[in-house]
Image: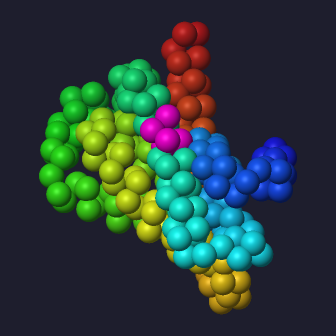
Amino acid sequence: MFQTLESFVLNLAHSLPLELFVIIASFIEEVIPPIPSPSIVVLAGSFAAVQQYSFHGLALLVLLASIGKTAGALVVYTVTKHAQSRLIETFGHLFGINEKDITRFGERFTGGLRDYVSLSILRSTPIIPSILLSFGSGVIKLPIRVFLVGTFIGTIVRDSFYLFVGYSGASALKSFTEQTTHIESIVTFGALFISGILLLYFLARRFRKSH
């Protein structure tokens, strides 16, 4: 499945204008987490180097990639936010929390400057999977203006680095990128694995109670 997704993205890179590729592929990458986060923009940077993009052209690519990723993040955020009550009702007791606890925690984020800065920093950190931030923001119902602005600014910082890696072709930076990608993938799949275990545990408990 993962190879199919990567092949699909690679085909997009060859068949679409680079500007259109980064916005579409970044959207897909945010909604479908198995695609490694840096791969889209690093690939775009490599293509931009071949096509001899100017500084303004590279800045446009970063801007478009950030727009696509923010749009994808908004999808995850919106779905999670609307499913929050059901998720807490189903899994909250496993962690000893309820909707009031989540609401009380979410109320700490009032839309102040600290919230914008915190999310921007988290979004710009390479090893933190962005889909987990989108999911978590939806669960605590982070103010949408904070979510959008923090996601957009943080993604610009993050994607600027990855685009430079692809454009410059620096081997040391590529090695660093591969390591951060590996860590990010481990964190993402670790979270998915733990979620799967908890789901199986919950289903097993309900099965035993029903019998």
- Against 152, residue 195 (above or below) is above
Q: Identify the residue at image location x=36%, y=46%.
A: 148
**Residue 155 picture location, percent across and down:** 46, 60
User: Quick one: 56 or 45, which is closer to the camera?
Assistant: 56
Q: Which residues are magenta?
A: 71-75
**Residue 40 picture location, percent across and down:** 67, 60
Q: Identify the residue at image location x=17%, y=39%.
A: 107
- Against 117, residue 67 (above or below) is above
**Residue 29 picture location, percent across and down:** 63, 49
Q: How is the image coloured?
A: rainbow
User: Quick one: 7 or 15, which is closer to the camera?
Assistant: 15
Is 204 placed left or right of 121 in the picture? right
Label the magenta part by its dominant secondary structure: helix
- Against 148, residue 18 (above or below) is below
Q: Identify the residue at image location x=58%, y=17%.
A: 207
- The quarter in which the C terminus is drawn is top right
**Residue 117 picture location, percent across and down:** 26, 62
User: Quick one: 22 or 143, which is closer to the camera?
Assistant: 22
User: Quick one: 66 or 146, which is closer to the camera?
Assistant: 66
